[in-house]
Image: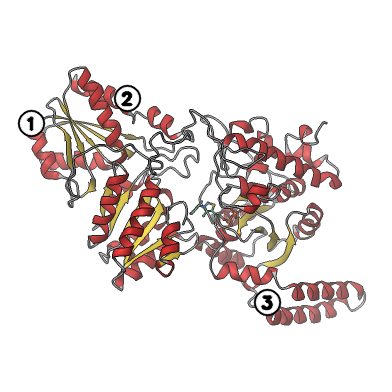
Amino acid sequence: MSKILDTINSPQDLKKVPQENLGLVAEEIRQFIIDSVSGTGGHLASSLGVVELTVVLHYLFQAPRDFIFWDVGHQSYAHKILTGRKNNFKSLRQLGGISGFPNKYESPYDPVTCGHSSTSISTALGVAAARDLNNQKHKVVAVIGDAALAGGMAFEALNHSGHLKKDLIVILNDNEMSISPSIGAMAKYLNRIISAPVYNRVRKEVEGLVKRIPRYGFRVYRAAKKLEEGLKNLLIPGILFEELGFRYFGPIDGHNTDVLLATIKNVKDLNEPVLIHIITKKGKGFKYAEDTPDKFHGVGPFCAQTGEKVVQMGSGLEPDPICRQSFTEAFGEKIVELAGQNEKIVAVTAAMCDGTGLTEFSKEFPSRFFDVGIAEQHAVGFAAGMSLKGMAPVVAIYSTFLQRSYDQLMHDIALQNLHVVFAIDRAGLVGEDGPTHHGPFDIAYLSSVPNMVVMASADQKELCDMLEFAVGHNGPIAIRYPRGSIAPIGAAKQDIQLGKSQILRDGKDLAIIALGSMVSPSIQAADILGKEGIKSSVINARFAKPFDTSLFLDLSNRINKFLIVEEGIVQGGFGSNIIEFFHSQNKDVKIKLLGLPGMFIEHGPRDVLLERYGLSGRPIAESAKTLVSS
Ligand SMILES: Cc1ncc(C[n+]2csc(CCOP(=O)(O)OP(=O)(O)O)c2C)c(N)n1
């Protein structure tokens, strides 16, 4: 049977569909997403929750002339399907394929490339302000989730919007979920609005009353408005959005296209800041995602009939042959063990409890576990406070999201020389989530922070040892480790000592100094080189800051070719700091730096990207050969 969706390749096509069929279009898109994402993996649950909203927005607005911003952007699949990317959608998140997030280089319908939370209202307000300065006429819409709305940047933007009073539409997509259930006072506040039917009924009745009085309408309206304010104060604890300068509408059913259409149509030309509060279900229409939205937030390939995970050979997702624990799991297990021995240990996450491996900790030590919501700056400031009182906070965070907290690292932690441990997961290339989620910058940005110690783990066992060391250290200290797992590097036991690295191989032709995740491929490279008669020393650097100056100097007395390998940007990174050091010592050594280029790197399987950027065994060996023969 032919589908309506077959006839839709652009918002212009959608606009030709009779209004009564929009619900059907939404259903077809939903099925299309389930079928497609079951093959590719992706952010399923959030995308399923906004299908009706997406259809209605593209029906009513004139994108790309009107700007539509999707906060985070993980929910933008229906938007992609309606804006010319349907036929290529099966390439979602694949190398060279459609990006999993809005991407300005992919489509004129994506005004920005994004993937971090709570930015949409700020950007939308900036666009609205510039539009007015240019005397232009178009609409600006920001769609933001309830958890993202609780991020500090979103509050700052709401506050500024109320001041500027620009024509701006914010759609609050409230599904009461972050990745796990939304937490915090904002979540409770929204929940109270949803469950205040008395107020909504009275408001409707008051509006109806006003409409029925023709001659004295204005006076009655004013009286009714006063009554409304009174009722609100009485029945809704706080009228946050209106007090911030927004006209608030809702809550409305975000899965009913008729209701969405009527509401948005009615308020879209008010020409003032408007907030429309819609209620949706995360995972809507796919039973397994509705039942366990956290498991289907970001998901690998799965069976669309049973919801079971599918393992595709060669996808990088096949089970580990020796059932290796991931770095995340190793961290999760070790922190529970350490917290059992040391009651000062507390764990802090910014809405990534499961992703950072803290689920077990949250169950074992609920009073010492703090999920602050999507609020990385606050997470770091909060850890500073805990440390001031003698606790040992461990902030578990992804490298890319710690970027948010640079000033807190500097001002609230390092300047005070406070003991806070940063467990930095997803450092380096993350794979399919792409440039917004890769974490190649942390070595550079952390190494420039005074007092900060920066470690990198070569395998899961070393991560555990480093965590133990970090908890016992006194001062700011970070451990970075990659996504996934690395086979044990098989090194002899050697305790972690501040600033000391570990010699793994001793050879005279060149020294390969490898940091963290690059130790294993550097060993492989040394094996390849060995077969060709090139003898290399291999050093597991362990510390990017302070690094092992005495060993490196000692090596430079015997070897004058150094290959430094790191999974981070070369500019301002570990290797570049070593060059600076040798230079300061007037050492005449030949150094080649291997790392990631200082640019945003595309999405694709992690191993493929590592190979492409010269950071796996074979290309490292090639670089070493070039260096040796130079
Ligand atoms: C700064 C930042 N921190 C953390 C994340 C990881 N993250 C992605 S989506 C998400 C939850 C978003 O929840 P909500 O805004 O309510 O949208 P929903 O997925 O429920 O539609 C989180 C924590 C992120 N993308 N950006």
The label on residue 355 is none
Read off the residue under disc 3. 236
- Residue at disc 1, secondary structure: helix
Q: Would you say the residues marked 1 and 2 are in contact, meaning their CB atoms lie under 8 Å apart?
A: no
Measure the alpha-carbon separation of dots 1 and 2: 25 Å
Measure the alpha-carbon separation of dots 3 and 2: 63 Å
**Number of other residues with Cα within 10 Å of mark 2, as a class: few under 14, some 14 to 19, many 20 or more:** some
**Number of other residues with Cα within 10 Å of mark 3, as a class: few under 14, some 14 to 19, many 20 or more:** some
Q: Is residue 61 left or right of residue 306?
A: right
Quarter the N terminus occupies: top right
Residue at x-position 7% and y-position 31%: 558
- Residue closest to the eye, 595 or 321: 321
Read off the residue under disc 1. 558
Q: Amino acid at mark 2?
A: Pro
Read off the residue under disc 2. 619
> In the rendered structure, which disc, 3 or 2, sits on the residue that comes first in sequence?
3
Figure quadrant of residue 441: top left
Percent position (x, y) of residue 127?
Answer: 60, 52
| Colour style of the rendered protein structure | secondary structure
Residue at x-position 32% and y-position 24%: 618
- Compared to residue 338, the image places residue 287 above or below, namely above
Quarter the C terminus occupies: top left
Measure the alpha-carbon separation of dots 1 and 3: 75 Å
> In the rendered structure, which disc, 1 or 3, sits on the residue that comes first in sequence?
3
Q: Quadrant of ligand 1?
A: bottom right
- Residue closest to the eye, 19 or 122: 19
Percent position (x, y) of residue 625?
Answer: 23, 21
- Compared to residue 90, the image places residue 388 above or below, namely below
> In the rendered structure, which disc, 1 or 2, sits on the residue that comes first in sequence?
1
Q: Would you say the residues marked 1 and 3 are in contact, meaning their CB atoms lie under 8 Å apart?
A: no
Residue 67 visible in the snapshot: no
